[in-house]
Image (cartoon, helix red, strand yellow):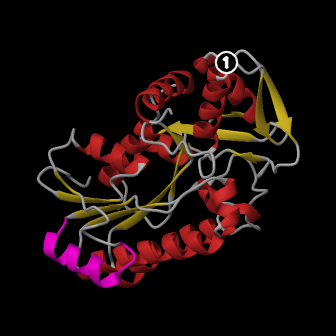
Amino acid sequence: MYELAGKRVWVAGHRGMVGSALVRRLAREDCEVITASRAEVDLKRQDEVEDFVQAQQPDAVIVAAAKVGGILANDTYPADFIYDNLIMEANIIQAAHQAEVGKLLLLGSSCIYPKLATQPIDEDQLLAGPLEETNEAYAIAKIAGIKMVQAYRKQHGRDFISAMPTNLYGPGDNFDLNSSHVIPALLRKAHEAKARTENQMQIWGTGTPRREFLHVDDCADALVFLLQNYSGDRHINVGSGEDMTILELTQMICDVVGFEGEIVHDLSKPDGTPRKLMSADRLRGMGWSPSISLQSGLATTYDWFLANAAG
């Protein structure tokens, strides 16, 4: 077990949804959390990252920094998604190696898996087939991060690991309809339709694709668990092990928001991957499981949206 007590832990990307959840979770451990704003360290600048790590000398690093977005953003700005994510993870991993950081955890995404992967998706399916076209650039950057972590383990003996969270939601999410993921997008749509007393709410595609969701605080708990208990070459899936259709999700969100109108489909928009459910067997086998139900998680996320992002 990797003891966190007395350690200095740098959470790179602490202002993001996952990073802020990690800061909240690490507050329960007897460790010192190190953070840096973009003004202090530009993670796309190798010299700035190396100088920061050398100055701070963290014992552990969690790479939660990433450029993220939904289908529209990924499909529209592929160069930004591949460059930003490649350069940030490369800079942090190399700087951690140079400073002889004792433990590093890199976060990826479930989009690393093939578009038509066998369900549920276990870790062995990485690179087993073509990726989903709309977020291929982001996925390739994250796959490169996994391989980089493995390479530093092999060549330098570093205790660097990686974890692949499923679709996350919760406090601090991005509710911009031009760049958000499905849950915050649907929460905002339902909220605005209710506020305007409309009798319809539109969703993309057929509503038949199946997706898995995990509350970000559950994800942070799983990541701290892995930091403490896992040291291995293979990446680990972090998910709930359960999925539902986008239409079922929309209906649940409408219940949470209180929108009673009709759900209509924009069939000119893409569905994306037909199904994406990750196997949670390896993480469950280590003794971790989620504790926040989707219904209650959506309710608290909507409360956060009302208090912080509704306009």
Magenta stretch holds residue 199: no
Q: Depth check: 289 or 113 in front?
A: 113
Q: Depth check: 66 or 109 in front?
A: 66
Which residue is situated farthest in the right direction here? 267
Q: Is residue 246 visible?
A: yes
Q: Residue at x 42, y 78 (%)?
A: 90
The answer to whether 140 is drawn above or below residue 151 in the figure is: above
The answer to whether 41 is drawn above or below residue 272 in the figure is: below
Q: Mark 1 points at which residue?
A: 259
Q: Look at the image and give the residue range highlighted in magenta.
A: 43-58
Q: In this view, does 288 lie to the left or right of 12?
A: right
Q: Residue at x 35, y 73 (%)?
A: 92
Q: Depth check: 170 or 107 in front?
A: 170
Q: How many marks?
A: 1
Three-letter amino acid code at the position of disc 1: Phe
Q: What element carries label 1?
A: loop
Q: Which residue is drawn at 57% across and 72% down?
A: 80
Q: Is residue 132 visible?
A: no
Q: In this view, does 149 lie to the left or right of 249?
A: left
Q: Depth check: 251 or 114 in front?
A: 251
Callout 1: 10 Å neighbours few (<14), some, many (20+)? many
Q: Residue at x 40, y 51 (%)?
A: 16
Dominant secondary structure of the residues highlighted in magenta in the image: helix
Image position, residue 223 (x, y; %):
39, 49
Image position, residue 198 (x, y; %):
73, 21
Query: Which quadrant of the structure image shows residue 187?
Result: top right
